[in-house]
Image: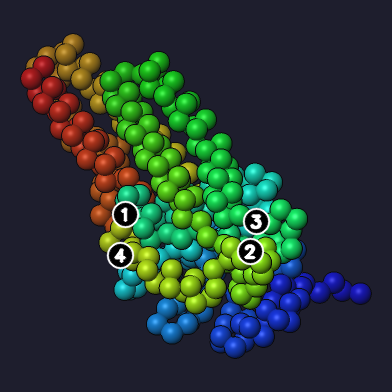
Amino acid sequence: MKKKTQYHIEQTADLKYTLKQQGLHNQFRVRHDQKEETFVPHFAIDGDKIYADLPGMRETNTELTQCVNNFVIKMLFAYGRNVRFIVPITQTQLEEMKGEEILETIQQILNISTDMTTLIDSVQPVLLKCKQQQEDGIDIDIAKHYLKKVLDAQIDPQIKQRMEKVVVEGELTESLEKSAQLVSMMAKKEFLMKFASKLVIFDPMDRPIPNADENCALSREDFNSLIDALSPSTNVICNVPMNNGLHERILSRIQEENKTCITITESYVKQAKQQGSKFNKQLSENDQIMEYLQSLQFLSMYKLVPDVEEKFALFNDFILANIKIIQSA
């Protein structure tokens, strides 16, 4: 007998009825075995709001599918009047300390934005799939504490490692870059702590969590009001979203190109100092350097990668400064 894929929405009659009453039935498909089945963006309309269920980071999409998703979602940001982010977290993820999974979801949102300070006001974490009638219940303050602890365990080792590298390694340009990375990590930690403090509990069926005597869950009406009250993130700050693996490959490629171009520049400066007026090469005529600058400029202009504007400005200043050094050699 062929096994039929089952979905949460098919398994829970009450939930199906509730969503049907809201006109949202069969809009989002979540598999019963908790595997994701969002390969392209799915949408549901509720009044003047459009909810978008975006692809996660762990699917085995092809890069072509990923590129399609990137530009579809980019169009949402370009034409949307405002954007807010709902970040679902399950009680099981907290209890089992699955910080890596939670941080990956947050990181994808951070990849989309160029301003963490503004972005936090547009993000709402939500604790879902909470158990009912537990002996100890579930307290929202305890849930927030656990979330902070889980996120701390992810970001603190990264900060410690970066601090050690800033102190020990590198020449001036490398140290400046690593110092900037450390500042960015500290800002990320501040974002994560504010994120955890905003956590709320919500049950799509408006059931009391953990029980009727001590209900910690927001009602559907209160949750809608909370989303409406979020500060909208305008399309100005939104980059093309991408999964974390693709994002890391792009950043890695930028870093490799940056190191190569710095090496070429240092070689030019060294030769210019040795040969004096006989040296006739120009950094502005080096194809690899110019292509890298043009690539950074393009990525910066269309906000395709976070922090690329700063990388472009720093590298451009670096090249201009070294052109003067070569000319005066």
Task: Indicate the secondary structure of the residue bearing disc 3.
Answer: loop
**Callout 4–callout 3 Cβ contact below 8 Å:** no
Residue 319 location (% of width, % of height): 20, 32
**Could you say whether the residue bearing mark 1 is in a helix, strand or loop?**
helix
Q: Quadrant of residue 313?
A: top left
The amino acid type of the residue labelled 3 equals: Ile
Residue 125, placed above or below residue 170 = below
Q: Is residue 232 above or below residue 135?
A: below
Q: Which residue is mark 4?
A: 234
Q: Is residue 213 left or right of residue 200?
A: right
| Crowd tier of the residue under label 2, counting other residues whose Cα lies within 10 Å: few below 14, some 14–19, many 20 or above | few
N-terminal label among 2 and 4: 2
Q: Which residue is mark 3?
A: 138
| Closer to viewer: mark 2 or mark 4 | 2
Residue 81: percent from the left, percent from the top?
A: 31, 73
- Residue under label 1, please give it: 118
User: Looking at the image, which residue sits at the far right?
Assistant: 1
Residue in view at x 50 percent, y 33 percent: 156
The Cα atoms of the two marked residues, 2 and 4, are separated by 38 Å
Callout count: 4
Q: Position of residue 1 (x, y in %)?
A: 91, 74
Question: How busy is the neighbourhood of tag 1: few (under 14 within 10 Å), some, or many (20 plus)?
Answer: some
Q: Secondary structure at mark 2?
A: strand
Residue 214, numbered label: 2
Name the residue nearer the viewer: 234 or 62: 234
Disc 1 + disc 4, Cβ < 8 Å: no
